[in-house]
Amino acid sequence: MSETSAPKSPIKTIVVGYDDTEPAKRALGRAAELAKAFGAGIVVTSVARPLALSNRGVGPVDPADPPSLHREELERAGHELSELGLEAELEVAFGPPAERIVALAERRHADLIVVGTREPDLLERLFGLSVSDAVEHRAHCDVLIVH
């Protein structure tokens, strides 16, 4: 490499799983710091969960968790990033959250996924419903879990 060429950034695209909770807000903040430091792009997704999964795909959307709620969450996240001088792509997804976050990261050739985590409750531990754990085990890129 010549002295005049700048080194390539190891992080070009960051995908953030976002749901407007405190852990997700911390994850968004950390992703913003990294995006600024590396000059990376940010793609923020919020995933509407289906009522049920079947062998034919996902069922109807949970009425308590509609896509419109996720669009509002993403608008707030986009506003937060805008105030920090960052532009982000915002994408509502539908399905199992970890699966959709990882699929988006693969589709966008992300270098890093950033998700928040909290202490799982008893049912989440029994049934393995932690989104951050599932993302960590399925992703083909680096994953940052923000506590």
Image: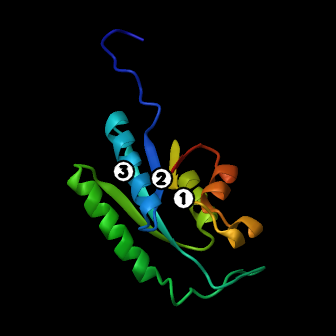
Question: Tags 2 and 1 in contact by the CB under 8 Å rule?
Answer: yes
x, y percentage for residue 42?
A: 39, 51
Q: Residues within 10 Å of mark 2 (few under 14, many from 20)?
A: many
Q: Secondary structure at mark 2?
A: strand
Looking at this view, is 58 or 118 the one in front? 118
Give the mark nearer the N terminus: 3 vs 1: 3
- Report x, y in % for residue 68: 40, 82
- The residue shown at (50%, 83%) is 65
Q: Is residue 64 left or right of residue 20?
A: right
* Whole-number angstrom distance, CA of label 3 to CA of label 2: 13 Å
Residue that badge 1 annotates: 104
Give the Cα separation between the discs numbered 2 and 1: 8 Å
Which amino acid, by three-letter code, is at mark 3? Gly
Q: Earlier in the sequence, mark 3 or mark 2?
A: 2
Q: Quadrant of residue 107?
A: bottom right
> In what element is the residue under mark 3?
helix
- If you read the primary sequence from the N terminus, does the residue marked by circle 2 or circle 1 appear first? 2
Taking the spot 41% from the left edge, 54% from the top edge, the residue there is: 26
136 on left or right of 78: right
* Dots 3, 2 in contact, CB < 8 A: no
Name the amino acid, label 1. Answer: Leu
Image point (56%, 86%), residue name: 62
Disc 3 to disc 1, C-alpha distance: 20 Å
Q: Are marks 3 and 1 in contact (CB under 8 Å)?
A: no
Residue drawn at 24 percent across, 56 percent down = 82
Res 9 seen here = yes
In this orientation, does residue 110 appear? no
Q: Which mark is residue 15?
A: 2
* Residue that mark 3 sits on: 29
